[in-house]
Image: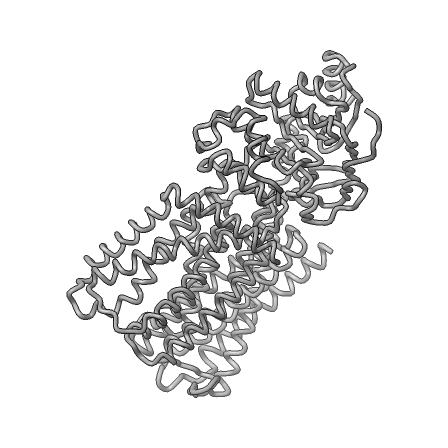
Amino acid sequence: MKKTSGMIDRLLFYTLVPSFFIALYLIFIWSPVEKVMGETQKIFYFHVGSAWVAFLAFGVVGYYSVRVLIKPRIQHHINAGISAEIGVLFTTITLITGMIWGKSSWNTWWTWEPRLATTLILWFIYVAYLFVRKMDGSNEKIARLSAVFGIVGVINVPIVFMAIRWWNTKLHPVVFGEGKNQSGGGIEPDMLVALLFSVFTITLLYIFLMRKGIEIEKMRHIVKKAKSKAIEKLAG
Amino acid sequence: MMSILKDAWIIASKDLSNEIKTKQTIGMMVIFSSLVVLIFSFAFDPTNNMVKAVIPGLVWLITVFSGILGLNRSFLSEHENDALTGLRSAPIDPSSIYLGKVLANFLLVTAVQLVSIPVLFLLFDYRFFGKISWFFLVVVIGTLGFIIVGTFLAALSANAKNSEMLLPVLLLPLLSPLMIAAVQATRIVLENETIGDAVSWLRLMSAYDLLFLAACFFLFEFIMEGS
Amino acid sequence: MKELGNMLELRNMTKTLGDKLVLRNITLTLEKGEILAVIGPNGAGKSTFFKCTVGLLQPTSGEIYLNGKLVKKNSAEMKQRIGFLGHESFLYNNLSPLENLKFYGKLYKVKDLETKANELLKEVGLYLFRDIPIRSFSRGMMQRLAIARVLLPDPEILMLDEPHTGLDQEAVALLNTIILKKRESGTSILIISHDFEQVQALADRAAVLRKGKIVSAKRLGGEVSMAELKQWYEAEVKGT
C-alpha cells in the first residue's frame, strides 16, 4: 500500500516536471502572439488554468464535506482542508493574473466581470472556511462544523455567479462564445492546444500538491497523537 | 411537522418576551443603526443630489450591520448556563430550535428596521416616490434571507471563543448574492422604474431564501450534535 | 429492592471521540425504582457516558433499551422520559423561576402546567421568589430550581450529574428527600458522583467506571459501611 502510493507520487512528479516545460514552451514560443493584446495575452493560459483548479478544489472541499457528514472520518476532514488550502493559493493566482489582464485590456485593475468577482467572493468563502477549521474544540466537532460550512459555501458559489452576472452585463470578455448575447472573440486552434495543455499541467500540479499536503497533514496527526499519548503516560 | 412549528414558536416567544422585558439587544440595535446612518450622512453630504444613489445600499447596510449584533446574541444567550444543552435534551426536533431562532431574529430585525429606515429617509431628506407595498416586499424577502443564513451561521460560530468576530467573516461572503439582488431591487422600487426588472431580482432572492432555508434546516442537526 | 424489570438497559455501548476510545463496551442495567451510582476518577468518561445515554451524543456502537424497547436515534420519546440534571442548570438568567419552568414545561408538553409548576416551586422552597429573575440567585437556589425543572415532566428515569456539588447542608438534605421520594414512586435514578457520603446514603447499587469501562458493580443498600465502600473503590480504581 505504502509502496504503490510512493510509486504514484514519483510517477506524478516525473510527468509533472516535463509537462511544465512543455507547457511553458507551448505558451511562450509555440503559440502565436495575440494581435490586439500582444504579449500580455500569455497570462491567459495561467489565469484559466488556475481558475479552473480554484473552482475544482472548492468542489473537492464540498465533496469531502458531504462525506464527513455521512461518515465522520478524519481522512475526509484532512482531504477537505488540504484542498481548501491549495484552493486559496490558486484563487489568489487567479485574482492577480485577472487583475493584470484587466489592467492591460481595459486599463483598470479591477472590473466586476462576473467570473472574476465570483472568484473574489470564492476567495473570501475559502478563507472563512479555513477560519472555521481553526476554531478550538474537539476534532470531531471541527470536522462537522467545517463540513457544514463547506457545503453551504459550495451551494453559494453558483448563486454568486448568477447574481453578479445579472448585475453587471457590461464587460464580458467571453473567449469561447457561450450563452446568449455572449459571442466571444473565438480562439485560434494553436492557442487552444496550448491552453488545454496548460490546464492539464496545472490540474496535475493540484493533484500532486494534494497528495503531498495530505501526507504531511497525516504525519502531523500521527505526531500529535504520539505527543498526547506521551503526555498521558507521563501524567500517569 | 406541526409539532416542530409549535416548538419553534415556544422558543421564539421565549426569546421575544425576554427581549420585550429587557429591551437590551433591540435598543442597542436601533441606536447602532441610527449611528451608522449618522456616520454616513457625514461621509456623503446629504444635501448633495448624488446621495440619492446610495440610499438603497444604505438600507441594507444598516440592516446587516445592526442585524449581526442581534444574531451574535441569539445563540450566545443560550450558552449562559448551557441552556442549549437543556433544549437539546428536551423532546423536540433540533430543527425547531433553528426555526424558532429564525422567527425571533426576523421579528427583532424587522422591528429595528421599522425605526432605522424612516430615520435614514429623514436624515437624508429622501422623498419616497415608489410603491410602498413593493418596497415592503423587497425588504421582507431580503431580510428573511439574511436571517435564514445569519441565524444558521450564528449557531455555527457560537461554538468558537471569538464568535463575535467570526460571524461577520463567515456571513458576509455568503450574503453577497442576496445583497446584490436586494440592493438592485430596492433601487428599482425606490426610483419607480419598471417593476418587471425588480420582479426578476425578487425571484432570485426568493430562490436564495428557499434554497438556504432547506439547506440550513437539514444541516442544523449537525451543528447541534454536541461533543 | 425487588426486581421490577429493567427500566433502562445499555448493551455494549462504545463511543470514540476522534481517535480516542472513551467508552468501551458498557453494559449496564437500571432497574425500576433503583438508585444506581456511577463513580470513577476524573477522565474516566463519566460525562460522555451520561451524554450518550441521554442522547446528546450518538454512541459509536451499541444499543440502548428503554422498557425493553430499542431506542432509535434522536428519539423524542426517550428524551421525554429522561430527566437530565447536568453540571449547568440549563436555566435562563433573565427569566423568573416560574417562567423558566413554564418554558420547559411547554417543550415537554406538560399538562396542567401552571399548578404543577407552582407546586414544584413550593416543594423546592422557591415559591416566594417565583417572579424574580434568577440572575441574582445563589448556586444552591439555582440547583433547586434546576431540580424542579427536571422533575416537571414526571420523568421515569432521573439522571443526575454530580447533583451535590456546591450545595449547602440544607439543600443536600432537600435533594436527598426528593430523590428518595421519587424512588418510592418508582422512578429509576442514575447518579454520577464523587461524594462517597451521598453515594453510601442514597444508592442501592454502585458501579465503578474506569478508563471507559465498567470494572465492577456492588450492591450497597445502606448495609455497606463507608470504609468498606472506599476500600472497594480504591481497589477497583487501581485495577488490582
Name above or below for residue C37 compared with residue B34.
above
Name above or below for residue B134 compared with residue C170.
below
Which residue sits at x=38%, y=68%?
A: B138
Quadrant in the rendering for residue B48? bottom left
In the drawing, does residue A93 fall left or right of residue A65?
left
The quadrant the N terminus of chain B occupies is bottom right
Which residue sits at x=47%, y=58%?
A: B149
Residue A205 visible within the image? yes
Percent of width and height locating residue A68: 63, 55
Q: Nearer the viewer, residue A33 or C60?
A: C60
The quadrant the C terminus of chain B occupies is top right
Q: Nearer the viewer, residue A96 or C68?
A: C68
In the drawing, does residue A91 fall left or right of residue C81?
left
Q: Nearer the viewer, residue C191 or B20?
A: B20
Percent of width and height locating residue B165: 40, 48
Name above or below for residue A141 compared with residue B133.
above
Percent of width and height locating residue C235: 76, 19
Percent of width and height locating residue C142: 52, 28
Which residue sits at x=70%, y=43%?
A: C78
Which residue sits at x=49%, y=51%?
A: B101
In the drawing, does residue A35 fall left or right of residue A45?
left
Quadrant in the rendering for residue A107? bottom left
Residue at the extreme left of the image, as rendered: B47
